[in-house]
Image: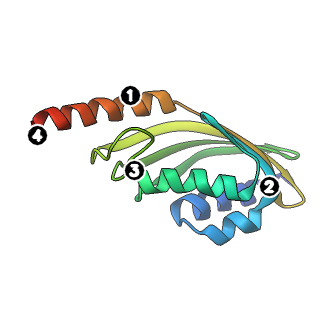
Amino acid sequence: MSDSANIGLIRRWMDEVWNQQREPTVHELLRADAVGHLEGLTTHTVDEFMAARAILLEAFPDFRLHVEDVIAQGSNVAVRWTAAGTHRGALLDVPATGMAVTCRGATWFVVEDGRIVEGWDCWNQGRLLADLRVAASTRSQGSA
C-alpha cells in the first residue's frame, strides 16, 4: 500500500475504533495475530486487544481521540494524538472519580497488506493513574 493509503487506514482506525467505538473495524483492520505494545501490557491477538480496549472504554465511556499528526514511510505509520474522557468507571485499582482527563501520546503502527500487524503506544499512564488516585482520595476524604 502507498504511504497515503496507510495514513488513511490509520486515521480510520483512530476514528472508528476509538471515537465511534466500532468493534467491527477492529476485526477488519487488525490482523488476527497482531501484537500491541500498550502501556504496561502486550496483546497478541484481537481478543486480547479487545479486552484491553474494553477496560479503557469502561473507565472512560466518553473517550475521544484527536489525531494531531500522522506520518508514514512504507509500512510504518506514526501518529501523535490527544485523548480525553471522563473517569466514570474503575480503572485498575482506582474507582470512578468523575474527573475529566486529557493526555497526549503517540502510536507507531506497522501495516501489511491493509491490516495492522503491530503497534506501540507511548503515553504517560503513570501520571494519569497518579492524578486519578489523588482525585479518588480527595473525593473519599470529602465524603467522610
**Going from the N terminus, do you reach mark 1 or mark 3 first?**
3
Checking the image for residue 130, the label placed there is 1
Marks 1 and 4 in Cβ contact (< 8 Å): no
Give the colouring mode of the picture.
Answer: rainbow
Residue type indicated by callout 4 = Ser
Rounded to the nearest angstrom, the CA distance separating label 4 from label 3 is 24 Å
Q: Which residue is mark 2?
A: 6
Amino acid carrying mark 1 in the image? Ala
Q: Quadrant of the C terminus?
A: top left
Secondary structure, mark 2, is helix
Earlier sequence position, callout 3 versus callout 2: 2
Mark 4 Cα within 10 Å, few/some/many (few <14, many 20+)? few
- Which secondary structure, mark 1? helix
Mark 4 falls on what kind of element?
loop
For mark 3, what is the residue?
85
Secondary element under disc 3, as helix, strand or loop, is strand
Q: In the depicted view, which residue is nearer to us: 11 or 88?
A: 88
